């Protein structure tokens, strides 16, 4: 490290070269983020949350087969590495004739993943709402789905925002794994550029900084949402 | 209006209600008293089928729910829609304002228009003395105010019977009066009410009949003037001595 830095200071031309690379690679990296990293995150999170709510409801339902299916699904996803899941979807399935393009394969994999992890958060949040809330909803004549949509889920949402934000921010970073199934998202762009000019430290650090900026913005949004949902809670 | 016939309720091995018979006529105010664990709250919860009795039947305004058979969903809906319930712990919806709490049933369940539901909710909240708290969230209200919202929420569905499950037990002493006053006004208007409570003053002032329950059975029932001054059963006397 010492040598790298002292070389740098001794060689203004090299500094100039690095700055130029950093500058010219910035747009391709951002493009990778905008065209793939963010869409991948948002779409997967959207489908993942729908899957998670359904899984959570299956887990707490009184129908045994539903409970079992939900349990096996959550256990299988949480018990296997995300990278292995992506490889099965993209490199494994073609063996039995199912070929999925990189982007949809990544969406599929990440959605399944978010679905499993978030379902535990949502299940815990639903179960944290006092039984009296269900009873009050029933006594004013609401059925199961009305009680759930109007009374229970809105309250459970508030409880789940902090842990779900964690899931979301992890997902932003996990999308870098899609580079290994040929999705040209931000990190793969960085790899491609670096393999041409050998400035791995520069390119990977640049990518890291962009991830950091994205996640910091998301944290601010999380604070805003939490603040908004806290309006009906005693401070 | 209500005929309860030989209701029993067991939770596993534990038999909480051991055959309850009770008739309540329209406009009557029945106060149920008894020691804790006697089954009085369970009886009340059976009336709107929050608990499904193990056996027996309940007839409400001509509709009979027979608990020896499997209940149709429609039967449960009927009992829920014709009874209003007020809980010990209020159970207001914390994410909705007082007004929204009261509007929720009419708008979502009865599909009333928002405008008419809103008008009705404003009237009901004004009636329980909260006309100036319409847009307050439950956490901004005192316990007594929350319970009055709870009463308005139940009334919004225009029930034939109001059920009160120890409505003042969670309240600070100085807040009990305002809730009891609302209940007394309701009784005076001719509302049919079943009230589980420890407020003997309320029972004396407002009840048409007091029912004493112990260990899952009705021990004694009578007019309050009779039951409180001249109880016929030894267990009633013991209980009244303990609480006075």
Image (spheres, helix red, strand yellow):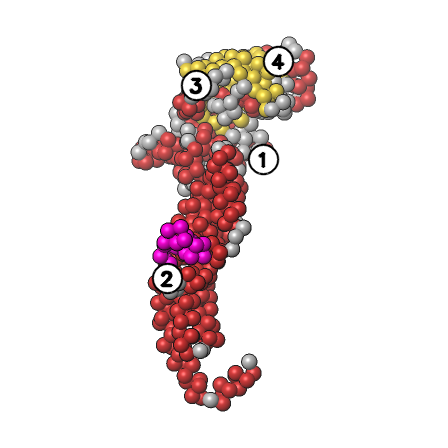
Which is the main secondary structure of the residues drawn in magenta? helix
Residue, disc 2: A36
* Label 4: which secondary element: strand
Circle 2 Cα neighbour tier, 10 Å, few/some/many (<14 / 14–19 / ≥20): many
Residue, disc 4: B219
Is label 2 or label 3 in front? 2
Of the numbered discs 1 and 3, the one sitting upstream in the chain is 1
**Where is residue A161 shown, x and y percent of the image?**
47, 51
State whether residue B129 appears in this view: no
Q: CA distance from mark 1 to mark 3?
A: 28 Å
State whether residue B75 appears in this view: yes
Residue, disc 1: B172
The chain under label 4 reads B
Of the numbered discs 3 and 4, the one sitting upstream in the chain is 3
| Up/down of A229 relative to A37, above or below | above
Circle 1 Cα neighbour tier, 10 Å, few/some/many (<14 / 14–19 / ≥20): few
Residue B77 figure quarter? top left
| Up/down of B191 relative to B154, above or below | above
Given residues B37 and A108, the one toward you in this image is: A108
Residue located at (66% from left, 22% from top)? B244
Q: Which mark is residue B112?
A: none
Given residues B30 and B1, the one toward you in this image is: B1
Magenta span of residues: A87-105
Residue A178 figure quarter? bottom left
**Where is residue A125 shown, x and y percent of the image?**
51, 44
Q: CA distance from mark 2 to mark 1?
A: 59 Å
* Label 1: which secondary element: loop
Residue, disc 3: B190
Asked if the stretch drawn in magenta spans residue B10, the answer is no
| Up/down of B182 relative to A28, above or below | above
């Amino acid at each position: 490290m010492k040598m790298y830095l002292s070389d740098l200071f001794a060689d203004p031309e090299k500094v100039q070269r690095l700055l130029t690379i950093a500058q010219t690679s910035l747009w391709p990296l951002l493009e990778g983020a905008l065209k793939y990293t963010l869409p991948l995150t948002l779409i997967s999170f959207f489908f993942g949350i729908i899957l998670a709510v359904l899984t959570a409801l299956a887990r707490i339902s009184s129908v045994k087969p539903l409970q079992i299916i939900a349990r096996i699904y959550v256990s299988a996803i949480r018990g296997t590495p995300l990278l292995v899941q992506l490889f099965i979807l993209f490199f494994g399935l073609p063996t039995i004739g199912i070929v999925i393009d990189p982007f949809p394969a990544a969406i599929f994999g990440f959605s399944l993943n978010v679905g499993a992890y978030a379902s535990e958060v949502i299940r815990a949040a639903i179960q944290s709402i006092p039984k009296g809330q269900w009873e009050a909803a029933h006594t004013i004549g609401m059925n199961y789905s009305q009680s759930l949509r109007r009374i229970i889920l809105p309250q459970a949402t508030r409880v789940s925002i902090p842990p779900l934000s964690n899931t979301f921010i992890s997902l932003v970073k996990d999308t870098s794994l899609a580079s290994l199934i040929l999705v040209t998202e931000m990190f793969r762009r960085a790899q491609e550029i670096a393999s041409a000019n050998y400035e791995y430290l520069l390119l990977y650090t640049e990518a890291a900084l962009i991830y950091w900026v994205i996640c910091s913005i998301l944290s601010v949004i999380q604070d805003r949402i939490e603040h908004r949902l806290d309006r009906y809670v005693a401070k | 209006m209500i005929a309860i016939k030989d209701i029993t309720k067991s939770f596993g091995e534990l038999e909480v209600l051991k055959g309850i018979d009770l008739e309540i006529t329209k406009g009557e105010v029945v106060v149920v008293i008894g020691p804790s664990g006697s089954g009085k709250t369970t009886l009340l919860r059976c009336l709107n089928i929050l608990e499904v009795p193990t056996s027996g039947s309940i007839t409400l305004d001509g509709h009979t729910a027979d608990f020896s058979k499997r209940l149709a969903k429609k039967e449960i809906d009927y009992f829920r829609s014709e009874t209003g319930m007020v809980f010990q712990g209020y159970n207001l919806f914390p994410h909705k304002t007082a007004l929204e709490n009261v509007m929720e049933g009419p708008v979502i369940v009865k599909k009333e228009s928002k405008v008419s539901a809103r008008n009705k909710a404003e009237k009901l909240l004004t009636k329980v003395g909260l006309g100036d708290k319409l847009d307050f969230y439950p956490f901004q209200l005192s316990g007594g105010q929350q319970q009055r919202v709870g009463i308005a929420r139940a009334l919004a569905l225009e029930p034939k019977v109001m059920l009160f499950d120890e409505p003042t037990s969670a309240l600070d002493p100085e807040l009990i009066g305002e809730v009891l006053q609302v209940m007394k006004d309701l009784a005076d208007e001719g509302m049919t009410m079943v009230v589980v409570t420890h407020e003997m003053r309320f029972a004396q002032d407002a009840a048409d009949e007091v029912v004493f329950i112990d260990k899952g059975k009705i021990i004694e029932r009578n007019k309050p003037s009779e039951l409180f001054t001249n109880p016929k059963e030894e267990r009633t006397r013991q209980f009244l001595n303990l609480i006075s």
